[in-house]
Image (tube, grey):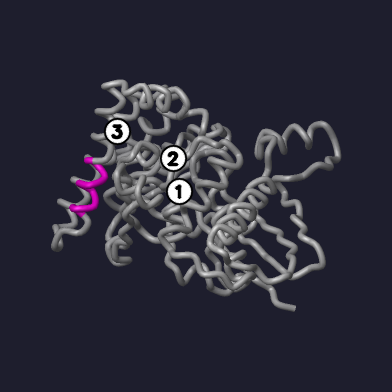
């Protein structure tokens, strides 16, 4: 029996976010410590197997309460279904007749829930990769993130942007330009995958507090309303976010800046990104404390996504250890991310030491 396995990794927005939902520009990366593994096999009927985040049976009220705090009320099956429907619609619209076969799909995920590391979109992108393999359908790479976006935004009414789906399809370190006229005419943006060696030059860290769980769409509702009302401050901020991402891309692609100059400039852009966000978004004090604690340890810091996790740079291992200790004091876990590559998606699932089930 054919077994199809796919994998998608956690995402961190390095620069420019959250302008991806507002025709801006972003620079993001995926990392292998957290992810989704999905298995699809042929079966007589289509079956979506429950994962841990879909549990409907509990040993006690305490266990139920803990599960809901960690995973929320919605789980991952709705994401699998929505992605499958959008994939089917895409094929029908193009006259692609799918083979008469059905599947059973199951998944496991260890991405910390609702802290802005893109667990939901990882489920969608892993599902789309599996569907393409199972039905032997080729979808242009640049359009694959659009299908994942439409699964969440159109089918499930989740307020989200392109960034997470793009980076989880492309992997590595990617610059994205969501120019309004281009997106509206093509239904996708301009995506540039930067050289893997570029990412290896960066002293990056990720830190997260699983207790800070928050639906990402909630953080955007008021800003989205103001953007659509053409609020001058919000429009100016989105333009500035995009410029920060562009500066970051140009810096990383410039001919061999010195390590110290690269580190200092990138740190400045990361800090500027958060300071701008702090001016236009409501930032919970617990989330701001994560950023300020990291900065007090000498590191740069900004949100990796919508809150609950931060990303930044550090100067050396000694500073990272100070950073890690300071963040631990406020219940936040820090790690050095391993930037994902396309090869990581197809590596031996049992031999790899970079992914573990939660």
Cβ atoms under marks 3 and 2 closer than 8 Å: no
Cβ atoms under marks 2 and 1 closer than 8 Å: yes
Task: Give the x, y percent position of residue 71.
Answer: 66, 39
N-terminal-most mark, 3 or 2: 3
Depth check: 183 or 3 in front? 183
N-terminal-most mark, 3 or 1: 1
Q: CA distance from mark 2 to mark 1?
A: 9 Å
Image disc number at residue 38: none
Q: How many marks?
A: 3
Q: Is residue 249 magenta?
A: yes
> Which span is picked out in magenta?
243-251
Quickly name the residue at label 1.
164
Give me the residue at 70% from left, 77% from top: 2
Quickly name the residue at label 3.
238
Write down the quadrant of residue 280 in the picture: top left
Depth check: 100 or 8 in front? 100
Q: CA distance from mark 3 to mark 1?
A: 17 Å
Image disc number at residue 305: 2
N-terminal-most mark, 2 or 1: 1
Where 237 sits versus 164, above or below? above
Task: Give the x, y percent position of residue 95.
Answer: 57, 64
Where 180 sits versus 280, above or below? below
Q: Is residue 354 left or right of residue 321?
A: right
Q: CA distance from mark 3 to mark 2?
A: 15 Å
Q: Is residue 277 magenta?
A: no
Give me the residue at 36% from left, 48% from top: 320
Give me the residue at 22% from left, 56% from top: 252
Write down the quadrant of residue 304 in the picture: top left
Q: Is residue 60 left or right of residue 9?
A: right
Depth check: 226 or 206 in front? 226
């Amino acid at each position: 029996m054919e077994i199809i396995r796919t994998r998608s990794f956690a995402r961190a927005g390095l620069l420019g976010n959250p302008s991806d939902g507002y025709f801006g520009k972003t620079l993001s990366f995926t990392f292998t410590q957290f992810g989704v593994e999905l298995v699809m096999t042929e079966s007589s009927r289509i079956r979506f197997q429950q994962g841990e985040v879909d549990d409907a049976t509990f040993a006690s009220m305490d266990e139920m309460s803990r599960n809901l705090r960690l995973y929320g009320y919605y789980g991952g099956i709705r994401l699998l279904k929505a992605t499958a429907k959008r994939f089917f619609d895409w094929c029908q619209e193009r006259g692609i007749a799918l083979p008469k076969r059905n599947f059973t799909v199951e998944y496991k995920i260890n991405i910390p829930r609702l802290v802005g590391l893109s667990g939901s979109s990882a489920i969608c992108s892993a599902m789309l990769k599996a569907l393409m393999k199972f039905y032997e359908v080729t979808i242009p790479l640049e359009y694959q993130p659009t299908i994942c976006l439409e699964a969440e935004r159109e089918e499930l009414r989740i307020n989200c942007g392109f960034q997470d789906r793009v980076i989880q399809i492309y992997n590595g370190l990617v610059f994205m330009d969501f120019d309004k006229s281009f997106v509206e005419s093509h239904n996708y943006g301009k995506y540039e995958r930067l050289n893997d060696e570029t990412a290896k030059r960066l002293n990056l860290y990720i830190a997260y507090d699983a207790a800070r769980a928050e639906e990402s769409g909630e953080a955007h509702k008021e800003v989205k309303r103001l953007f659509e009302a053409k609020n001058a401050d919000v429009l100016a901020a989105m333009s500035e976010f995009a410029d920060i991402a562009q500066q970051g891309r140009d810096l990383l692609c410039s001919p061999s800046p010195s390590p110290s100059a690269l580190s200092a400039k990138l740190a400045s852009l990361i800090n500027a990104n958060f300071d701008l966000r702090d001016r236009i978004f409501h930032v919970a004090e617990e989330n701001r404390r994560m950023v300020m604690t990291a900065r007090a340890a000498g590191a740069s810091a900004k949100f990796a996504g919508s809150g609950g996790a931060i990303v930044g740079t550090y100067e050396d291992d000694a500073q990272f250890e100070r950073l890690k200790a300071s963040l631990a004091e406020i219940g936040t876990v820090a790690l050095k991310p391993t930037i994902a590559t396309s090869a990581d998606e197809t590596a031996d699932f049992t031999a790899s030491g970079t992914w573990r089930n939660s």
